[in-house]
Amino acid sequence: MLIQILFLNPILYLMIAVSILLALTVHEYSHAQMAYFLGDSTAKDLGRLTINPLKHLDPFGTFFLFLFGIGWGKPVPFNFLNLRNKRFGPALIAIAGPASNFSMALIVGFVLRFFPLVNQGLISFLVIFVWLNVLLGVFNLMPVPPLDGSHILFSILPASLNRMKMSLLGSSFILVFLVILFMLYIGIPFICRPLFYLITGMPFSI
């Protein structure tokens, strides 16, 4: 559990907590910004078009996130009827979150790769920040509800498969559990670690 790190290495836990907070905040803000760009002001009217972390934290999701390392932020609402692009609008809103995480990972990763940093504490923080953004981006692209990948999938699937969509929505808990197992045994070693190495030029280690 993540909370164990707090007692074993408080500085490391603080680095992880700050990285999670930043990654989650920009992720949710990006959903809100894309919805606003596409013509819906629902998130803006609710105060979600901001990088204030307090606006994007779900009480239970944040508790589990900082305790176990698995949790969620407060979902960004949008009104489908207000979107200029109703066909792909929901997919664009969904992909904005993971895209922001990959963008942050790329920017900070290139700093690690091409700038001669000497402060070991700063290097450790940046490594953690890149890793968590890669992890969050990949995890959220999994095509199961309520993850962002499901909204992308549903936008691509034809209306004739609505029954299948409803079936997936009804099995969200089981599917997310399966995604966690997938991430542990396939996603992290075969997707996240290679991506991290591709971005930073170094293997992931704290």
Image (cartoon, rainbow, N blue to C red):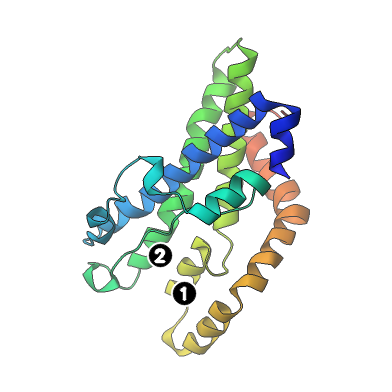
All told, the count of numbered labels is: 2
Q: Are marks 2 and 1 in contact (CB under 8 Å)?
A: yes
Q: Position of residue 18 (x, y in %)?
A: 53, 33
Residue placed most toward the observer, 51 or 102 = 51
Q: Secondary structure at mark 2?
A: helix
Q: Which residue is at 22% across, 56% downward? A: 45
> Which one is earlier in the sequence, the residue at label 2 or at label 1?
2
Can see residue 191? yes
Q: Which residue is at 57% across, 81% downward? A: 170
Q: Quadrant of the N terminus?
A: top right
Q: Which residue is mark 2?
A: 91
Residue placed most toward the observer, 105 or 14 = 14
Q: Which residue is at 44% across, 83% downward? A: 158
Q: Is residue 108 left or right of residue 12?
A: left
Q: Position of residue 52 (x, y in %)?
A: 35, 40
Q: As shown in the figure, which amino acid type bears the numbered disc 1?
A: Phe
Q: Secondary structure at mark 1?
A: helix
Q: Which residue is mark 1?
A: 154
Badge 2: few (under 14), some or many (20 or more) residues near its Cα, within 10 Å? many
Residue 2 image label: none
Q: Which residue is at 44% across, 56% downward? A: 74
Q: Is residue 35 left or right of residue 72?
A: left
Badge 1: few (under 14), some or many (20 or more) residues near its Cα, within 10 Å? many
